[in-house]
Image (spheres, rainbow, N blue to C red):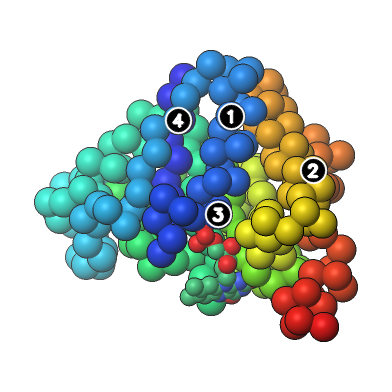
Amino acid sequence: MSTLIFTASGHGKHSLTLKLAREFAAGFAEVTGDEPDVIDLYKKEVRPCKGCLACWYKTPGKCVIDDDGNKLLNKIRKADHVIWAAPLYVFGFPSEMVKMIDRMMPNIKPDITYDSMGRATHPGIGAENGKHILITSGAFPQIKGNFDGMLFQVKRLFGEDTAVIACCASTTMLLGKKDAFRPYIDSYMQALHQAGKEYGSNGKISEETQKILDQPPMPEKEYVDFVNRK
Ligand SMILES: Cc1cc2nc3c(=O)[nH]c(=O)nc-3n(C[C@H](O)[C@H](O)[C@H](O)COP(=O)(O)O)c2cc1C
């Protein structure tokens, strides 16, 4: 098996989201023995899609832009699992991640078909259901009304079964120096590790573990009061 982690954060190797992805990947590796290959999109040359659609009509399956985008798309094709580790930027993906996602157009075919929900689609969209995992983090203490755009996009593009871990109130995880916050951080990290193990065992995160990961790591009011210095 082979697993990729794509990271795209202004915080580079200090990215909190990458730290979360590594914890999930450690649990996953415990079961599968598969160590991930980490690719930092801030360090790659992935130019924006030109919208020429040559990858559909002239050179089917291949983008005409000669840069890292093509090489990375080939890596995605060969990988068994792809973990997209991106912080939430302005309710969506950071631009470096958006560019890579757009450059996956060669995986899609131009005909219009319909999916099981009656939505117009193209062959290739949703075809890799179960292969992709989204791990993201955001500073607001809620998932709903914050991560919706990003979550819709990954499920629409990669398939409704795409595993999603959205760590809200992410600043909690940066408060480790305060002893009072340590237990919150430790139990969130334990749940992430467990999620990786479960995913490695049967390609799914259990409802019980998902429920923990869908809550702010610390109580919402305590978090907001702390952030607002009350
Ligand atoms: C440009 C920018 C936009 C952001 N937009 C949001 C947002 O819409 N919602 C949110 O909850 N957090 C937002 N944040 C906070 C980050 O998502 C959060 O701090 C995240 O945990 C940082 O992870 P990283 O260390 O991996 O970059 C934003 C941060 C930046 C720098």
**SS assignment at label 4:** loop
Q: Are marks 3 and 1 in contact (CB under 8 Å)?
A: no
Mark toward the start of the polypeptide (2 vs 3)? 3
**SS assignment at label 2:** helix
Mark toward the start of the polypeptide (4 vs 3)? 3
Query: Residue 198: percent from the left, percent from the top?
Result: 72, 28
> As drawn, is 196 to the left or to the right of 72?
right
Q: Is mark 3 within 8 Å of ligand 1?
A: yes
On the question of residue 183 being in view, the answer is yes
Picture layout, residue 75 above or below residue 219: above
Quarter of the C terminus within the rendering: bottom right
Q: Which residue is mark 1?
A: 26
Q: CA distance from mark 3 to mark 1?
A: 15 Å
Q: CA distance from mark 2 to mark 3?
A: 16 Å
Give the residue at x 71% y 42%: 189
Q: CA distance from mark 2 to mark 1?
A: 16 Å
Q: Which residue is mark 4?
A: 36
**SS assignment at label 1:** helix
Mark toward the start of the polypeptide (3 vs 1)? 3
- Of the pair 19 and 135, the residue shown nearer to us: 19
Q: Nearer the viewer, mark 4 or mark 3?
A: 3
Q: Which residue is mark 2?
A: 187
Give the residue at x 55% y 53%: 17
Give the residue at x 65% y 43%: 163
